[in-house]
Image (cartoon, rainbow, N blue to C red):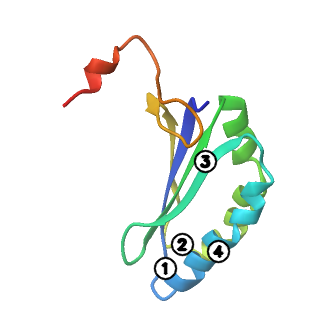
Amino acid sequence: MVNCALLLRLEAQPGKEAELEQFLKSALPLVEEEPETVAWFAVRMGPREFGIFDAFSSDTARQLHLAGKVAEALKQKAADLLSKEPIIDKIDVLADKLPGAPSRIRGDLPPEAFAP
């Protein structure tokens, strides 16, 4: 069950794109140690733009992740790899579709409210 998430936006310093990409890929084993992190994605959105999207079952799990090994590693590498501070958005999940789980919509809105 997913109730909340994080969206981080990261901008690599010029010439540090490959290093930032490798750093993000290397974070996967650390995230795999976090049972409360339901889903985790490291993404590239542009030539120097990267991101992380994580999903959690609770805000407590999200806070644990923010205090975890990936966050600590990113803090240590930020000055070398990033051209500016990461943008971190805390997100409330309204609906989800995950493998092996039924689709869910949160709140009082009926499913037809999301129809095109």
- Position of 59 with respect to 94 (left or right) is right
Q: Position of residue 5 (x, y in %)?
A: 55, 40
Q: Is residue 18 above or below residue 70?
A: below
Binning the other alpha carbons within 10 Å of mark 1 as few (below 14), some (14 to 19) or many (20 upward) gives some
Are the residues flagged by discs 4 and 2 in contact, CB closer than 8 Å? no
The C terminus sits in image quarter: top left
Mark 1 → mark 3, Cα distance in angstroms: 27 Å
Q: Position of residue 37 (x, y in %)?
A: 69, 44
Q: Quadrant of residue 101?
A: top right
> Disc 2 marks which amino acid?
Leu
Q: In what element is the residue under mark 3? A: strand
Is residue 61 or residue 40 the one in the foreground? 40
Question: Disc 1 versus disc 4: distance between alpha carbons?
Answer: 13 Å
- Give the residue at mark 1: 13
Residue under the image location 60 percent in, 53 percent down: 40
Numbered mark located on residue 39 in the image: 3
Query: What is the C-alpha distance between the residues marked 2 and 1?
Result: 5 Å
Q: Residue at x 50, y 82 (%)?
A: 17
Report, in whole angstroms, how far the alpha carbon at label 4 lies from the one at label 2: 12 Å
